[in-house]
Structure formats: structure tokens, C-alpha cells
Amino acid sequence: MAPAQTMANQLRQRLLPVLHSALSQDQAVKSK
């Protein structure tokens, strides 16, 4: 696997949980 692909996968694994938590917080704020 190319180093760039590995870095992209690592970034995605780090960013996905952050995006999910941000989205859930955003929906929680809107539902109030």
C-alpha cells in the first residue's frame, strides 16, 4: 500500500468519529 493511501486512511479513521460527534451535537442542539 502506498504511504499516501495509509495516511489518508489514518486521517479518515481520526476524522470520522469527530464528524459523527459534531453531527450528533448539532442535531441535539437543534432538537432543543
Image: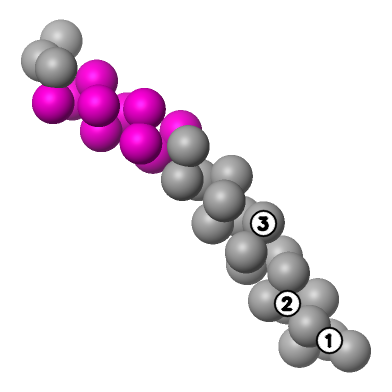
Q: Label 2 is placed on what type of residue?
A: Gln
Q: Is residue 16 left or right of residue 31?
A: left
Mark 1 crowd level (few <14, some 14–19, many ≥20, 10 Å Cα) = few
The span shown in magenta is 4-13
The CA span between labels 1 and 3 is 15 Å
Q: Which residue is mark 2?
A: 27
Q: CB atoms at circles 1 and 2 under 8 Å apart? A: yes
Taking depth in this image into account, of 1 and 14 the one nearest to the observer is: 14
Q: Is residue 22 left or right of residue 3?
A: right
Amino acid type assigned to the residue bearing label 3 in the image: Ser
Tell which residue pokes out farthest to the right in this image. Answer: 32
On the rendered structure, is 17 left or right of 14? Answer: right
- Residue holding disc 3: 21
Image location (x, y in percent) of residue 22 = 62, 64
From the viewer's perspective, is the residue at label 3 or at label 2 nearer? 3
> Is the residue under label 2 in contact with that under label 3 (CB below 8 Å)?
no
Q: Which residue is mark 1?
A: 31
Quadrant in which the C terminus appears: bottom right
Q: Is residue 8 above or below residue 21?
A: above
What secondary structure is marked by label 3? helix
